[in-house]
Amino acid sequence: MNIEIKNGRLIDPASGLDKVANLFVADGRIVAIGDAPEDFYVEQVIDATGLVVAPGLVDLSARLREPGFEYKATLESEMEAAVAGGVTSLACPPDTDPPLDEPGLVEMLKHRARQLNQANVYPIGALTQQLQGKKLTEMAELHDAGCVAFSQADIPFENNLALMRSLQYAATFDFPVWLRPRDHGLVAGGVAHDGEIATRLGLPGIPVIAETVALSTMLLLVKSTGARVHFCRISSASGLDMIRAAKQQGLPVSCDVAINHIHLTDMDIGFFDAHYHLIPPLRSQRDREAIRAALFDGTIDAICSDHTPVDDDGKLLPFAESEPGATGLELLLPLTLKWAEEAGLSLTQALQKITCDSARVLGIDAGKLAVGAPADLCLFDPEAEWRVEPKQLKSQGKNTPFAGSQMRGKVRHTLVNGQPVYHTL
C-alpha cells in the first residue's frame, strides 16, 4: 500500500532527524522523506499534524504466554496490546509451556504471529533442554528456525559448568546469550528488596548480592569464553557499577532495565499490593537513581516493558504468595516519556532507548526512519493525557502498578511493514 503521512514531526534517534515533514511508504518500506518520489501515487493519506512520527518501538521482553499459558493471555490479545502501545517488534522469552527448545515450537510461534499480521515477533530460544539447566539445546537449529538469541529466562542453571558450556557453544557460533543475573540460593524464596520495607512488612527479602554474586560469576565466564552476553533487568546500583566496569574493560556485554524500575521503589509496595510484586524486586531509591544515571551515561543500553500478563487469580493473593509480573506493552511509551520529562531529556533521547538502541541489542533491522528502512512506525500525540484503566487495556493481563495513574503520550497510529495495524482517535 502506498501511504503518505503528512505534516508529522519526524523523530529518528538513529540519525538525529527531528523536523516536520512528509513521509512516504510503499511496498512495506519508507521510500521518501520530504518530497514524494517520482510517479508515486497515493492510496491512503494519514494526517499527522500535531503528532510525532517515530520508528516503531522495539521491546526486548514481552511474554506472550503461548504456548501453554493461554489462561493468562493469548497471542491475539498481546499482539493487539503491542500495536496499541506502538510496539512493532518484540522479543519473547523462552519460558512457555513447553519451553522454546525445539525448532518446531519456534516455527509454530512465528507462523501464528505472521498470521495475525501485527507486531514482528522475535523468539528467544532456550539455552538448555526444557530450561532444566543441564543439557544444551540445538542452538544452531533453533537459530535457523528464527531464534535471535538464547536464554534461561528466570530458570537457574544446575551449576556453573553448564553455564560455561552454554557460553562456549554460543561463542563458537557468535550467538548472543541473554542472562538474568540472579543467584537462586541467595534469593531463597524472597519476594521483595531486602531492606527496611520488607522487614517492616514481614516479607522475605532478596538482597542485592543475589544479583551481584551471579553477575560476578557471569562476567568472569564472559571474559573466559568471549561470548556476547546481554544482561536482562538489572536492578541495583552495585550491579550497574559492575557492568560499567566490564564495558570499560571491553567485554562484549550489554544490559537493559525494566520500565517499572525507572519509576518505582520498594516504598511503593505500600500495604502488600501484589501489583508491585515483580522480578527482580523493586529496590531502594538509591538504586532507582543509579538506574536513571546509568541510562544517561549509556551503561544501560535499552529500556523494556518486561511485559508479564498475569491472571486475576495470580494477583488476588497475599503478596508473598502472588505471582510476580506486570503488564507493560501499552505503558512503555508514556512511561518512557515521563522519565525523559523528569530527567530533562529530549524526545529524541527518550525514544532512542526504546527504538534504535533496543534494535541494536536484538540485532534486527528496525528502530529507524530512513529511506529503504522497514516502514514500522509509531505515530503518537505527545501531549495527550489519559488515565490508566486496567479494564481498557488491550492485554488480557490487567495487572499493573500504574492503575489509576495519569499518563501523557498516546499512540494514534501504528504501521507494521507499511500496513496500518492500529488507529484510534
Image (tube, helix red, strand yellow):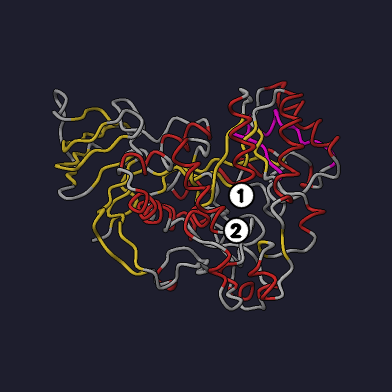
Q: Are marks 1 and 2 in contact (CB under 8 Å)?
A: yes
Could you tell me if residue 80 is visible in this image? no
For the point 27% across and 64% down, the residue is: 385
Compared to 66, does 91 lie above or below? above
Q: Position of residue 212 (x, y in %)?
A: 71, 45
The local crowd at label 2, few if under 14, some if 14 to 19, many if 20 or more residues have their Cα within 10 Å, is many
Of residues 130 and 401, the one drawn nearer to the viewer in this rendering? 401
**Quadrant holding the N terminus:** top left
Disc 1 is placed on an element classified as loop
For the residue pair 121 and 93, the one nearer the viewer reads as: 93
Residue 320 on image: x %, y %:
70, 72
Tell me, for residue 283, which label it has, or none: 2
Q: Is residue 29 left or right of residue 355?
A: left
In magenta stretch: residue 142: yes
Q: Which mark is residue 236?
A: 1
Q: CA distance from mark 1 to mark 2?
A: 7 Å
**Residue type beneath disc 1:** Ser
Which disc, if any, is residue 17?
A: none
Extent of the magenta region: 134-152
72 shown above or below 279? below
Q: Is residue 379 above or below residue 13?
A: below
Measuring 61% from the left and 76% from the top, which residue is drawn there?
A: 272
First along the sequence among labels 1 and 2: 1
In-front residue for pair 340/324: 340
SS at circle 2: loop
Q: Is residue 60 left or right of residue 147?
A: left
Image quarter where the C terminus lies is bottom left
